[in-house]
Amino acid sequence: MTRGVGVTELLTELPTAVIVLFAVLTQLGDFWFVSTASLLLYWLGSATPWLGRGLTRERGAMLVGLVATAAAVGFALKGVFAFPRPPNSEIVAAAADLPWPVEPFYESVVTGQGYGFPSGHATTSVLVWGGFAWALRVGTRRQRYAVAAAVVAVVSLSRLVLGVHYLVDVVAGAAIAAATLWLVLTRLQTPTRVFALVTVVALVGVVAGGLTRDTAGVLGMGVGGLVAWTALDGVPAPTRRGGVVTTALGGVSLGTIGLVVVTLSPQDAVVGILAAAGTGIALSLPLVGERVTKKSGRGSGS
């Protein structure tokens, strides 16, 4: 009750249909969604004028770095504080009454894993959606930040409705993420420095919570991003065909790495190595995609 001040308990009494709706909406702040969106923006960038107008490779890499930053900050602080999540047995039990396609999805979303403070989804939505508002040039600046604020509000509310966080977890996550976003955009300003920050914060997470699959993975993202972006001597601007080739290569390579992690359940240290390799590959792939289309004589289709 202290961390939730009664809000979580009240919201979890909503009808199951409403809770299922928020289980869908909470995906806007989930790692799989924001990482996919950030990678696509980095790979395609200005080759998609309807969304990526004015989006440089460096700004795209900053978005990838913000995803890693959100994960690093979240896991590090969870390990430091080790506060439990609220009990939500009634919400989990409601899964039994749902139809088959919905039931496993719903149960996976409302069965929170790990510690509860701060909310990883609130942290991620502020950092990454705030990053989208900063990096993109769709609409006006005020409109972009209004959309980001709306997404943050919906995702934060969803964590309370689903019963996987207390109010304090969500508020603290959003506040910490806002301060981190300010640091990244006004002081660090380059992907190299952002990935260096990820590496340092991830090491704090390893010290505080031990080497787990999560902490090893985010440490790998930091190291892989830092090494790759430091080594890259300029990444060519995207063309439409080059962006498509890059995205296809990225889907195959990162999909393969993800499949290995899920199916083979390698040791935590190996997960870190794979995460480092995956991040380095993701940042380097535009070199390959653009070169392939240039050699084929179709790279001018931008």
Image: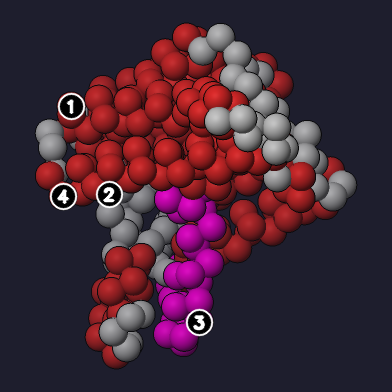
The amino acid on which the numbered mark 1 sits, given as a three-letter code, is Ala
- The residue pinned by badge 4 equals 263
Judge whether 28 appears above or below 19 on screen: above
Q: In which quarter of the image is the C terminus?
A: top right
Residue 129 percent across, percent down from the top left? 63, 46
Q: What element carries label 1?
A: helix
Residue 171 percent across, percent down from the top left? 55, 50
The numbered mark, 4 or 3, whose residue comes first in the sequence reads 3
Q: Are marks 2 and 1 in contact (CB under 8 Å)?
A: no
Q: What are the residue bounds of the magenta stretch?
A: 6-34
Q: Residues within 10 Å of mark 3 (few under 14, many from 20)?
A: few
Alpha carbon distance from label 1 to label 4: 16 Å
Judge whether 293 appears above or below 15 on screen: above
The amino acid on which the numbered mark 2 sits, given as a three-letter code, is Gly
The numbered mark, 2 or 1, whose residue comes first in the sequence reads 2
The numbered mark, 1 or 3, whose residue comes first in the sequence reads 3
- The residue pinned by badge 2 equals 114
Alpha carbon distance from label 3 to label 2: 25 Å
Which of the two marks, 1 or 3, is nearer to us in this view?
A: 1
Q: How crowded is mark 1: few (under 14 residues within 10 Å), some or many (20 or more)?
A: some
Q: Do the residues labelled 4 and 3 touch (CB within 8 Å)?
A: no
Q: Quadrant of the N terminus?
A: bottom left
- The residue pinned by badge 3 equals 18
The numbered mark, 1 or 4, whose residue comes first in the sequence reads 4
The numbered mark, 3 or 2, whose residue comes first in the sequence reads 3
Q: What element carries label 3?
A: helix
The amino acid on which the numbered mark 4 sits, given as a three-letter code, is Thr
